[in-house]
Image: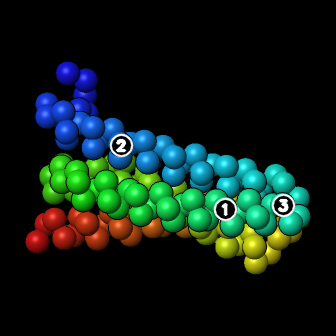
Amino acid sequence: MPIGTASDDGAARVRRAGWLVTAAALLVAVATLVLVGLVPPSPGRTVAIVVAVVLAFGLAGWRAVRARRDPTTVAGLRPISSWLAAFGWGATVFSALVALAAPDSGGRAVIAGILAGCLLVLVGRSSEQVAARR
């Protein structure tokens, strides 16, 4: 049996779907970072950024539903796919906010998105660690 799969077919299917959503969230995040970093400000870029944010929220909701169906934990902590999806959401949303607020600052938007994603994961993971120890 491959690493990361469950022996129960239903649980394995839910876990694979969770990874699929995580991959989609990371793909949206990368596309958003490339978009705000390389494409000059234009109405088309603004529409693409708004679509990316809507996709990020949709994928976050889908991931939340999948996480409820997959109760597996490692030492009381959520699997890494949950945190990768959270990073993707944070990077997408915060880089989009900075890009929309300051359209000429693409580099700042990329850095802000990456830092916000990292901060979101750091705070969430540390709070989960504290809760697991109690």
What is the distance, in whole Å, between disc 3 and disc 2 at their CAs? 32 Å
Residue situated furthest bottom in the rendering: 101
Q: Amino acid at mark 1?
A: Val
> Is 61 placed left or right of 109 in the picture?
left
- Residue at image location 47% in from the left, 57% down from the top: 59
Residue that badge 3 annotates: 44
Separation of disc 2 and disc 1 at Cα?
22 Å
Within 10 Å of disc 2 (Cα), the crowding (few <14, some 14-19, many 20+) is some
Circle 3 sits in a helix, a strand or a loop, which is it? Answer: helix
Residue at (14%, 34%) from the top-left corner?
8
Q: Can residue 39 be seen by looking at this rendering?
A: yes
Q: Which mark is residue 17?
A: 2
User: In the drawing, does residue 17 fall left or right of residue 93?
Assistant: left
Give the mark nearest the N terminus, 1 or 3. Answer: 3
Is disc 1 placed on a helix, strand or loop? Answer: helix
Q: Residue furthest top?
A: 1
Within 10 Å of disc 3 (Cα), the crowding (few <14, some 14-19, many 20+) is few
Point out the image quarter for the C terminus. Answer: bottom left
| Extreme residue in the front direction | 10
Q: Is residue 115 above or below residue 30?
A: below
x and y, in percent, of residue 83 in the image = 38, 55
Question: Which comes before the other along the chain, label 2 or label 1?
Answer: 2
Q: Which residue is mark 1?
A: 51
Q: Quadrant of residue 110?
A: bottom right
Please name the residue shown 71% across and 72% down the image: 98
Horizontal side of 43 relative to 59 (left or right) equals right
N-term mark: 3 or 2? 2
Query: Residue 25's x, y, as percent?
Result: 51, 51
